[in-house]
Amino acid sequence: MENCAFVSDDFSTGDMVRINFVTIADLSPRIADVDSIEKIEAGDVSNIDEEVIEWLKEKGYKIY
């Protein structure tokens, strides 16, 4: 199963966000119920360290 992500026209890769979780299930991969997502600051992919991007890709995430 591919890792899933939240997708919205209001958010871009590199934005700083605050996520409030309701629950996080002890499964693999983790599954979380989200209460709210708030954009704190706009950004872009250049705001993310290259090491972090590579780690995310290794875990199966797609970076847009």
Image (cartoon, helix red, strand yellow):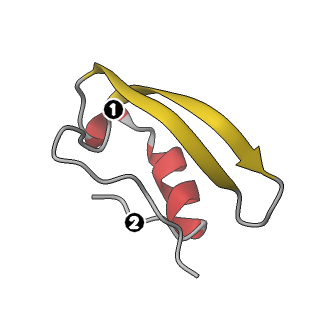
What's the amino acid at mark 1? Asn
Residue 12, quarter of the rendered image = top left
The image shows residue 2, relative to residue 31, as above or below, that is below
* Distance between mark 2 and mark 1 Cα atoms: 16 Å
Residue positioned 32% across, 37% down in the render:
14
Nearer-the-camera pick, 2 or 34: 34
Q: Are marks 2 and 1 in contact (CB under 8 Å)?
A: no
Picture coordinates of residue 15, whole percent (x, y)? 31, 31
Q: Residues within 10 Å of mark 2 (few under 14, many from 20)?
A: few
Nearer-the-camera pick, 49 or 31: 31
What's the amino acid at mark 2? Lys
Pointer 2 or 1: first along the chain: 1
Q: Which residue is mark 2?
A: 62
Residue 28, quarter of the rendered image = bottom right
Q: Residues within 10 Å of mark 1 (few under 14, many from 20)?
A: few
The image shows residue 23, relative to residue 57, as above or below, that is above
Residue positioned 39% across, 52% down in the render:
6
Q: Which residue is mark 1?
A: 47
Residue positioned 33% across, 32% down in the render:
47
